[in-house]
Image: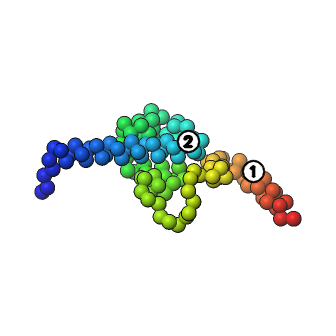
Amino acid sequence: MVMLTRQQLQAMARNDENFFKELGARIAKSRKELNLTQSQLAEKLGIAQQTMAHYEGGKLRMPASFLPELAEILNLSLDELLGLSVSKKTNKRGPTSRLEQQMQLISQLPKMKQKFVSEMLDTIIGNSDG
């Protein structure tokens, strides 16, 4: 069994602390880009808004079981959420485009409103062909 020194344990704790602060900052940034409030994001995860605030501030460690759902809600890959280098599938850089943000928000609307938006888009796209 490997025994770690106090200094090694402290270094690991600092690394963990930094990781969770950076994760919280990425969550907050992505949430804001989607125009979601902490309360809205917390509700989607089934947690209290104050808990979400503590996750974003790096004061609490987010359970790993939340990460897949959180990545989906924020329209991120797990790699992006965790701050890992993103695969080179896309050359896109910078913030999410306005259209992508709108599409994400539309996907969260009730089905009837989604249908209405879809019909409007069909009408506009159909009229642009000619």
Q: Nearer the viewer, residue 73 or 46?
A: 73
- Residue 107 in view of the camera: no
Mark 2 Cα-neighbour bin, 10 Å: few <14, some 14–19, many ≥20? few
Say whether disc 1 or disc 2 marks the residue closer to the N-terminus. Answer: 2
As shown in the figure, which amino acid type bears the numbered disc 1? Phe
Coloration of the structure image: rainbow
Q: Nearer the viewer, residue 12 or 53?
A: 12
Q: Quarter of the image containing the N terminus?
A: bottom left
* Residue found 60% across the figure and 41% down from its top: 35
Residues at discs 1 and 2 in contact (Cβ within 8 Å): no
Q: Nearer the viewer, residue 119 or 8?
A: 8
Q: Is residue 49 left or right of residue 103?
A: left
Judged from this view, the residue extending furthest toward the top is: 50
- Could you tell me residue 70's position as x and y percent? 48, 49
- Could you tell me residue 16's position as x and y percent? 31, 46
* Residue found 14% across the figure and 55% down from its top: 2
* Residue found 44% across the figure and 59% down from its top: 85
- Could you tell me residue 67's position as x and y percent? 43, 51
The answer for how far apart the CA atoms under marks 1 and 2 are is 26 Å
Q: Secondary structure at mark 2?
A: helix
Q: Secondary structure at mark 1?
A: helix
Q: Quarter of the image containing the C terminus?
A: bottom right
Q: Which mark is residue 23?
A: none
- Callout count: 2
In terms of image quadrants, where is residue 59? top left
- Could you tell me residue 104's position as x and y percent? 61, 51
Question: What residue does disc 1 label?
Answer: 116
As shown in the figure, which amino acid type bears the numbered disc 2? Lys
Question: What residue does disc 2 label?
Answer: 32
* Residue found 49% across the figure and 41% down from its top: 28
